[in-house]
Amino acid sequence: MIPISSPYIGEEEKAAVMEVLSSGQLAQGPKVAAFEEAFAAWSGARYAVATTSGTTALHVALLAHGIGPGDEVITSSFSFIASANCVLYVGATPVFADIEPAYFTLDPEDVARKITPRTKAIIPVHLFGQPCNMDELTELASEHNLAIIEDACQAHGARWNGQMVGSFGTTCYSFYPTKNMMSGEGGMITTDDAAVAEQARLIRQHGMAKRYVHEMLGFNLRLSDLHAAIGLVQLKRVDGWNAQRQANAAYLSEHLADVPGVVIPAVRDGAEHVFHQYTVRVQDRDDAVKAMSEQGIGVGIYYPTAIHQQPLYKNLGYDLSLPETERASREVMSLPVHPFVGEAELSQVTAAVKNLQPAAVLV
Ligand SMILES: *Cc1c(COP(=O)(O)O)cnc(C)c1O
């Protein structure tokens, strides 16, 4: 089976973890500080604050921006559930805008329609590694005085008009094993805003500015030095891996461009897509997934159920229609694109997709 993802731990990662174990400093310490500094330099943001996961990075970022009960935050329903749950964690209300069908990212026109006097922030999700239309979203944000909190958990190193996604506002990353780079578990908040960075540092550590002086209600969301040591090594690898993902995506697109009924992923003008996932649309998706699996190809469905249609949100009373989000959740299928898929395997993937016709695909 060609796996849909292939987390990599090399000798250097192992040695880095052993070094931390030998040092006896296991919790948040010098490795976390070094990881934050290196990540800030790499992303082009002034500050970086590490947390335990992408989910907690989003949670802390919203708190650091002062978002809470009575506030509305606009995000995408076509995402991993954390993109919306972070809003619930702080007692605010997630408001879902639809996506642009070509790119699977927030549709700025629908975002504009969903803005109310209570809207405080937009969470653009750079889904699958493709940046949202940040020109239009940042323009809307400045017009309505909204914070931008980017969910770049799938978009380490993606660029919009040459500018790194993590440098538009406050941005959250995940280092879960399947992401473009990882630390085991882990997350990072980047920002140019000194006050947001300061708040985030307080919130992740029990609101503690000085030892055992607690200024506010915080949490224990500290990353460990063991995880940071892995992240530091992976940060040196991520640009090379992204280039390999892009090359793999180019191969897939070249060979799948003319397959009837298969819609290959489009890259927006001005976007540098880092292909966390290579996601096509097919008509009879469930049959297609079954046929691909039978041919030894590990495919993924991200995501089979839109967030607003999850039981959690239905039970909260969400009852809205987002036609493009719902259609995408029925049609998407992701193919292996990770840096460890070789050319022979890529050709197996494209052959398997071509074999799908005509039964499983739209003609
Ligand atoms: C992975 C992911 C998250 C959450 O990150 P964790 O580290 O798993 O908590 C949030 N948003 C998106 C879009 C993700 O892909």
Image (cartoon, rainbow, N blue to C red):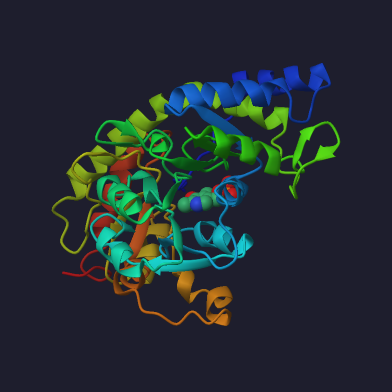
Percent position (x, y) of residue 148? 42, 48
Residue at 69 percent of width and 39 percent of height: 202
Horizontally, is 153 left or right of 97 in the view? Answer: right
Q: Toward the viewer: 273 or 100? A: 100
Query: Could you tell me which quadrant the C terminus lies in?
Result: bottom left
Q: Is residue 346 above or below residue 63?
A: above
Position in image of residue 86 (x %, y %): 57, 57
Q: Residue at x 72, y 33 (%)?
A: 224
Identify which residue is drawn at 45% across, 82% down: 319
**Which quadrant would residue 252 be assigned to in this image?**
top left
- Evaluate whether residue 145 shows in this view: yes
Q: Relative to 298, say whether 71 is above or below.
A: below
- Residue 131 screen position, x and y as percent: 33, 45
- Residue lying farthest to the left in this orientation: 258
Spot the residue most to the right.
Answer: 212
How many marks overall?
Answer: 0
Q: Is 127 left or right of 67, judged from the image as shown? A: left
Q: Is residue 10 visible?
A: no
At x 75%, y 47%, the residue is: 216
212 or 161, nearer to the observer: 212
- Pick the residue in front: 238 or 349: 238
Which one is in front, 209 or 130?
A: 209
Q: Position of residue 218 (x, y in %)?
A: 74, 47
Left or right position of 203 against 69: right
Q: Is residue 355 above or below residue 165?
A: below
